[in-house]
Amino acid sequence: MITRKANRFPLFVAPFAVLAATAALCTAQDPAPPAESAKVDPASAGQQQSAADKPSEQKNPRRPETFRDALDAAGDDGVIVFCYGPDWNQRSVRMLESFWKQAELEKVTGQALLVAVPIYEYPTDKQAEESQRISAGMPSIPFNVCPTIMMVDKNGSMYANLPGMDFLGNEKGSSAFKNIASKLAEHRKLLDLMKKADSLNGMERAKVLGEIGELSIEKPDNFLDLLKAADPNDSTGLVRRNTHSALQFLYKLMDTKDGFLKTDFHTTLHDLMGESMKVINDKALRAEDRQAAYCLLIGQARREEGGSRRMKDLITASMKIDPNSFYGRAMPRLSQLWGNERANETSDERRDRRAKEKEDDKKRRIRDREVKKTERNTSVE
C-alpha cells in the first residue's frame, strides 16, 4: 500500500499567511491604508526565498552515525567499519576524506552500511564518550592498526579484516576497493552455500560445507560442528582438512617451555620423519599444509652432515605437491640459498667448498658431543 504525507505549507509561508490574515481583518474594521512598516523589502524577500529553496541536509541512510544503528538496520551485506586514529594516525584521518567519504565506495559495497569509528590513543573524557557511543557493540579490532577496515555480517560477527597499507593501499584506497569487493563477494557466496547446505544431508552436505572451508574469510562459529555432524567418520577428509594447523603441528613437536624440539637440539631428520610424513602423505590436507611439514624436514636436513643432498631431494618432492603455492614458489630460491648452488661455480670451487662444509660439520658434531657430555655430568652432580 502506498501512503502519502499530508501536504504542508513550507515554513517560510507561515509569516506571510499571518500577515495577510491580519491585513484582511484590519481592512474589514478600518479601510485605512496599511502602514509603511508593513511593506516587505524586495531584497529581504529574495533572501528568504533563496533560503527556502535550499533543501534541508539529509543524512545518508547508507552511513549511520553509530555501529549499533548500522547493525540494527543491516541486511545480508552487513556492516563495513572504518577505524581511524584522530589523535595519532594522520594518514587514517586523511583517508577519511580521500577514500572513505567518496561516493565510489558505496558502489563497491553493495547494500552494506558504512560506519566510521574514531579510535583515540589519549582521548579526553568527551572523546572517550564519543568513541564509546559510536563503537558500542562492535567486535574488537584484531590488530591495533589504523586505518583498519572491518567487515561484519548482519549478526555482528567479523568475517574479514583489512588493516593498514598492505590491504588498503595509498590514501585514496588504491587496494581497498578491490579487497573490499572481493571479501564481500566471498561473504555472499558463504551465505548461498549455507542455504544450500541446509537443504542437504550426509556426504552431500559435508561437500558443500567443504566449499565454505576454502573461502578466505572467517567461517561461522559453528562451522566445524556442522561439518563433523555431516561427516562424523570424516569419510571425505574435510574435517581433517579444516582442523589441521601447520603452526599447531610445529608446536606439537616443540617443548613449549624453551622453544626447542622435544628431543633438544640433537634432533635428527629421522626423529622428525615419522610425524611429518603422516601430514605430507595425507592428501586430504591443503597443499601448503603438507609443504609446511616438508619445510620442517628441509630445515633439519640443512643442519646435518651430508644433509645437502637430502635437502635437495626434499625440496624437489615438496615442489611436486604444488609448484604454484606460497611454498612452491619459494622453494627454488630456498634451494639456491640453502642448497649452496652457485651459478658460476667451477668444479674446483665446488669441491673446495664442500670439503670446508664437511670440516665444519665435523667440528659442529664434536662441539655438540662435548656440550651433551657436560650437560650429563652436570645433571649427575
Image: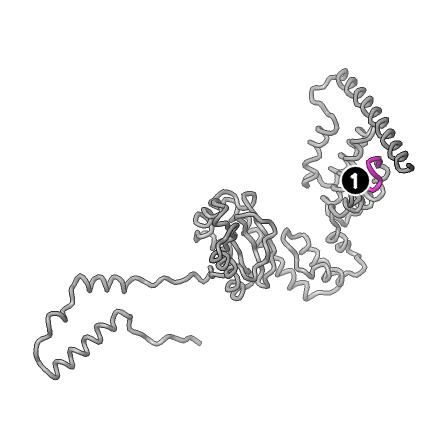
Tell me if residue 154 comes above or below residue 263 in the rendering.
below
Asked if residue 260 is among those painted magenta in the image, a careful observer would answer yes
Tell me if residue 286 comes above or below residue 22 in the rendering.
above
Q: Which quarter of the figure has residue 319? A: top right
Q: Position of residue 328 (x, y in %)?
A: 70, 38
Q: Pointer 1: what residue?
A: 260
Q: Which quarter of the figure has residue 291? A: top right
Which residues make up the magenta segment?
259-267
Does dot 1 land on a helix, a strand or a loop?
loop
Other residues around mark 1 within 10 Å, as few (<14) / some (14–19) / many (≥20): some
Q: Is residue 240 left or right of residue 135?
A: right
| Nearer to the camera, 160 or 226 | 160
Q: Position of residue 282 (x, y in %)?
A: 79, 47
| Nearer to the camera, 114 or 232 | 114
Q: Furthest-bottom residue in view? A: 29
Q: Position of residue 257 (x, y in %)?
A: 78, 45
Q: Is residue 341 left or right of residue 115?
A: right
Q: How many marks?
A: 1
